[in-house]
Image (spheres, rainbow, N blue to C red):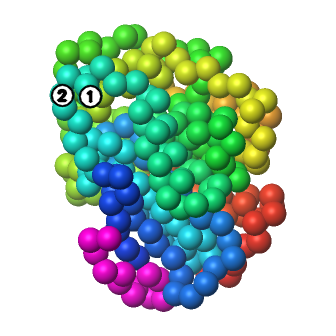
């Protein structure tokens, strides 16, 4: 631990480095009986993308964690050659490392690229529930893009990030978040976006929920397509861009997920 726990409106928040991976934990002061929730970010993002949801889920009684995958903000660096050629399995290893640290199966919430990572982890039986937020889909739904060059990292500029990730955010907020984006591995992006990652849905036996954004301008699958693949319930957040958890509707979206968790057996706390 490199930061002492801080009391914040009855919440305790602390940062840790777990096998080189940055993890932020937020929970209510005192004991909770609800399971842990682990948030996994999308490409070029980091733990910070879930700051609002960490507080909301903690006030809902959950032990909330958000992590940064390797080579993302706060976590350990990968040499350039290895990073360019990396496969998405490396990110799965990162998530499983943090799940092992937490010590019990967790509720996995994966955004965008983090969603396909969480689907792969859930195949291994390491999830009590799975929430896919504007998520990449499995190869069975088709590929997302043409193959990217693998001789340089991928980093959207501010204008491209605003077009792809945001919809209702103020220009100041868009600039703030765009500055925190980091280069993404083209090897990883080609793995899930061009080659595709096939998922054996029979091996995902936990409850599953799909959330998408009405104004998502990326190439992730629609709610109907992804939820249909898993025969799962879904919700489309109106007037919201790809980064649902950073948009003005973040609070409402979090409440939708909390309501769904309550409906599948995780009782809802009054915040």
Left or right: where does residue 81 sit relative to residue 205? left
- Residue visible at 61% across and 20% down? 198
Give the vertical position of 39 relative to 267 (above or below).
above
Q: Residues within 10 Å of mark 1 (few under 14, many from 20)?
A: many
- Element carrying mark 2: helix
The magenta segment is 1-12
Q: Of residues 59 and 234, which is closer to you in this image?
A: 59
Q: Is residue 2 magenta?
A: yes
Question: Residue 229 appears at what percent x and percent y?
Answer: 73, 27
Q: Is residue 184 magenta?
A: no
Residue 101 tag number: none
- Element carrying mark 1: helix
- Residue visible at 59% across and 34% down? 120
Residue 83 tag number: 1
Q: Of residues 161 and 170, which is closer to you in this image?
A: 161
Question: Residue 133 appears at what percent x and percent y?
Answer: 56, 45
Q: Of residues 4 and 173, which is closer to you in this image?
A: 4
Circle 1/circle 2 CB separation < 8 Å: yes
Residue 216 seen anywhere in this rendered image of the structure: no
Question: Residue 252 appears at what percent x and percent y?
Answer: 58, 63
The residue labelled by disc 2 is 80
Residue 17 seen anywhere in this rendered image of the structure: yes
- Residue visible at 53% across and 82% down? 28
Left or right: where does residue 191 sit relative to residue 231? left
Q: Quadrant of the C terminus?
A: bottom right
Question: Residue 166 appears at what percent x and percent y?
Answer: 38, 45
């Amino acid at each position: 631990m490199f930061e002492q726990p801080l009391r914040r409106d009855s919440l305790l928040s602390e940062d840790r480095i777990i096998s080189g991976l940055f993890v932020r934990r937020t929970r209510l002061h005192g004991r909770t009986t609800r399971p842990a929730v682990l948030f996994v970010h999308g490409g070029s993002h980091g733990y910070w993308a879930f700051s609002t949801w960490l507080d909301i889920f903690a006030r809902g009684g959950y032990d909330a964690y958000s992590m940064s995958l390797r080579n993302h903000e706060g976590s350990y660096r990968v040499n350039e050659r290895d990073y360019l050629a990396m496969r998405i399995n490396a990110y799965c290893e990162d998530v499983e490392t943090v799940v092992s640290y937490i010590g019990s199966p967790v509720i996995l919430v994966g955004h965008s690229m983090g969603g396909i990572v969480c689907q792969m982890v859930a195949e291994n039986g390491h999830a009590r529930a799975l929430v896919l937020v504007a998520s990449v889909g499995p190869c069975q739904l088709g590929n997302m893009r043409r193959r990217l060059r693998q001789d340089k990292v991928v980093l959207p500029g501010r204008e491209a990030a605003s077009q792809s990730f945001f919809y209702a955010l103020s220009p100041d907020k868009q600039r703030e978040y765009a500055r925190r984006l980091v280069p993404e591995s083209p090897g990883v992006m080609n793995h899930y976006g061009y080659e595709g990652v096939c998922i054996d849905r029979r091996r995902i036996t936990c409850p599953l929920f799909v959330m998408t954004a009405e104004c998502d301008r990326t190439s992730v699958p629609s709610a109907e397509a992804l939820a249909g693949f898993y025969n799962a319930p879904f919700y489309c957040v109106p007037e919201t861009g790809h980064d649902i958890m950073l948009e003005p509707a973040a609070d409402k979206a979090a409440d939708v997920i909390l309501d769904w968790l309550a409906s599948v057996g995780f009782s809802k706390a009054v915040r």
